[in-house]
Image: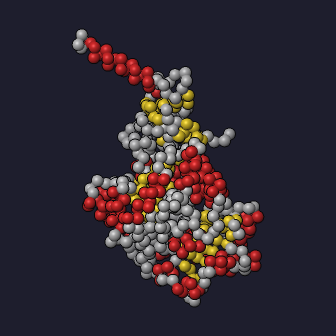
Amino acid sequence: MQRFLPNLLAASLAMTSLQAMAAADLVLFNGKVFTAEPGQGLVQAVAVQDGKILQVGTDAQINALADERTRRIDLGGKVLMPGMIDSHSHPVVAAFDSMGATLLDEVKPLPELEQWIIEQDRAGRARAGDVISIAGVSSAYWENSRQLGQRFNQGRWADQPLVLSGIDGHTGWANNAMLNRLKIDAALVKSLSESERSYVGHEKDFTPTGYFAESRWDLVRSQIPPPSQQVMLKAAREAVRVNNQYGVTAWMDAAANAGSGDSLFDFNATEQSYGVLPLYRELAQQGELTAHVAALLLTNPRSKPADLAVLDKVVQKFAGVPNLTFPGLKVFADGVLEFPGQTAAVIVPFKNSGKDGQLLIDPAHFGELVVAAEQRDWIVHMHAVGDRAVRESLNAFEYARKLNPTPMPHSISHLQLVNPKEFTRFKQLGVIASMQLLWATGESYTVELVKPYISAFAYGYQYPARSLHNAGALIAGGSDWPVSSPNPWNAIAQASTRKGPLGVLNANESIDRQSMFYAYTINAAKALRLEKQIGSLLPGKQADLIILDRDVFKVSDEELFDTQVLKTFFAGKEVYTPAS
């Protein structure tokens, strides 16, 4: 009798457990299910209950959890995966740009460019107040700044302010009508420090050509009349819609507290530096934020530990907003590699100038800021393009590890150049490599605007995905939208082929699609510090799911590039289906 009672109790508990599991709200079966749990193969089906993963397994196991109230979806052999996660994006700004006049990186001959701008203005897409503002402009235009001036400083443009915003977010061009408004002339350029003057395109007599980079560009674009809150709320909705369309259900907003008029590279946060955070809050309150947003707070590269108290007040103001979290800080270590900007911090100086770029952080003290962030349980997410910026970022993380050996999931984004001496340091320090591998292509940016100006050795390690992966680095996928498309399928395919209009970029640095599937799921979840909630189909995690139109494990890279999402689920609710 003493043995019988415990057995009876165990049986009773087992029945109770089965009854509880029989209440699945949604079952998806007869598919190829990638769980993103390392070591687990494909399964057939998934059960969802109360917005969370209940169980994964065989069709028989999952169908047994359904009753007459359960929604059943026969996948018909299609692939089901966790929602995609973008580890570096600026989606609200990107969506706003897409609603106006944007070139989307297309290079047009100048006569065609002028006609296109006129047409965009007539269509009502180009105006910000009385300024004609064009987004998404290719860096390939900047070496022709004088020719831009010859066309856009006379005739109809003599009194019409015109601003061309570089798609890279670091550079741009303005015509004389805009420069006159801002009182930017030869005398001003001459008065700048050598460092600041390097951010301004100018003639020998210091007359500005209209080209600007980094902090000087920030000053120009900050004078473009800002959009209304209603317009920005519309952009925020569009950002969510576009991401859901591509199967993206979470992202790292890589400067969430910065507004359109702020200087990103000399950013000095205040308690009122809210950026797009109020927009996310409003969407969340209306039940429209169908994505997880991990909001990074931008801080000045030369910030002191005490300055973080201001950012903490911003966090407290938005604490508790559903689907909005605050994992830590965003810091710019340098700028861009492409000519004529060349503000990325490099180890071997640029061939044309003999300069080594602009390192924005102070190597002697930046580690102290990292330590202060860790004491608040914040990560630090670095913008580092050049190999010197990457090295000094890692040095700061190493400084923190000497004081606290337990790694924090800090991350470095972009990683255009990485010296091989740094490869193993990522794993050793627990630093995540947030890579935008849609950029790993033989094109104007990597070949014409970079190759002639940097060492052949450094060029051989441009976007070194495979080297980092082989060294044990955790790679997380990212887009940096609007710099490039938010479509993860494009980037996953490109990471493998590295093909472009000017050839293949460092073929030995290609990385396989299976690794990239992890990069956009569980690895990116770790970068967002949300791996306990999302990133894989583990029972208890939120049911963020996507159904795909093709077998992404078998199709060619070309077909993989064009993958379409048939359904996106957020917390078990369908939030995207293509229009019929």
Q: State the residue in front, 318 or 203.
A: 318
Q: Where 176 sits versus 498, above or below?
A: below
Q: Where 286 sits versus 12, above or below?
A: below
Q: Residue at x 33, y 57 (%)?
A: 375
- Quadrant of the image for the C terminus? top right
Image coloring type = secondary structure
Q: Measuring from the top left, give residue 32's x and y in whole percent.
A: 48, 36
Would you say 4 lies left or right of 578 here? left
Q: Farthest residue in the left direction?
A: 2
Q: Residue at x 62, y 81 (%)?
A: 183
Residue 285 seen by the camera: yes
Q: Farthest residue in the top direction?
A: 1
Q: Measuring from the top left, give residue 412's x and y in whole percent.
A: 41, 60
Would you say 110 lies left or right of 383 here? right
Q: Residue at x 53, y 46 (%)?
A: 291
Q: State the residue in front, 450 or 292.
A: 292
The quarter of the picture where residue 229 lies is bottom right
Q: Measuring from the top left, give residue 561's x and y in whole percent.
A: 55, 50
Q: Where 529 sits versus 211, above or below?
A: above
The quarter of the picture where residue 334 lies is bottom left
Q: Residue at x 62, y 51 (%)?
A: 238
Q: State the residue in front, 575 or 83.
A: 575
Q: Farthest residue in the bottom direction?
A: 205
Q: Measuring from the top left, give residue 160's x and y in whole percent.
A: 72, 74
- Quadrant of the image for the N terminus? top left
Residue 514 seen by the camera: no
Numbered label tally? 0
